[in-house]
Image (tube, grey):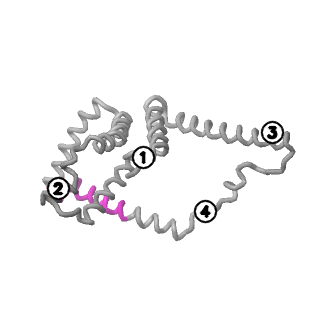
Amino acid sequence: HDLIFWRDVKKTGFVFGTTLIMLLSLAAFSVISVVSYLILALLSVTISFRIYKSVIQAVQKSEEGHPFKAYLDVDITLSSEAFHNYMNAAMVHINRALKLIIRLFLVEDLVDSLKLAVFMWLMTYVGAVFNGITLLILAELLVFSVPIVYEKYKDPSKTPRNRQKKGRITTWKPEMQQLLKHHLIVIMSLLVL
């Protein structure tokens, strides 16, 4: 939430810039080329830093050791319990998606299946105009720009505090807040993927 509202400008700028560059790179080059260039860039930075530190240690005759020693000693193993917890959480979503797919394609409810057919038919027209990467780039631009513009220029009379004064609403229900947070997390994870 803080990321898309630009609360920490450095962190948001880094995430926005890297994902936008990554999507633009994928629009111009193949996935294999982009991944290879990213790995080469990372290796060139780490190897250059290691050589720089080795030269500094030789000139100053110090015994600092390996510059990445603290990171090499970090335990990054995933415990079987944590792995099972992640898999159980993923299985809930996978099972729900499989049930929905079966329900739609085997026409349990005719109206829902027809809605999917109409939506997919409309998506063929969208696909004729845009490719997937272009839609992802547009979605990222919207996610990182619309909330901050809305927050900056929103009408103060439409805030929950002012509505409460007029008697329109009293408070947000906790279930609604949780639902909105869940949808925001799902949308952000889809954009990152």
Label 2 neighbourhood size at 10 Å, few (<14), some (14-19), many (20+)? some
- Alpha-carbon span between mark 1 and mark 4: 24 Å
Q: Is residue 107 magenta?
A: yes
- Alpha-carbon span between mark 3 and mark 1: 39 Å
Identify the residue position indicated by label 3 in the image. Answer: 55
Q: Residue at x 18, y 56 (%)?
A: 107
Q: Residue at x 25, y 38 (%)?
A: 123
Q: Residue at x 28, y 30 (%)?
A: 128
Q: Is residue 30 left or right of residue 68?
A: left
Name the kind of residue labelled 4 in the image: Thr
First in residue order: circle 4 vs circle 2:
4
Name the kind of residue labelled 1 in the image: Val
Residue 37: image location, x then y, percent: 57, 35
From the viewer's side, name the closer residue of 38 and 151. Answer: 151
Identify the residue position indicated by label 2 in the image. Answer: 163
Please provide the residue range marked out in magenta: 92-109
Which of discs 3 and 1 lies nearer the camera? The answer is 3
Identify the residue position indicated by label 1 in the image. Answer: 192
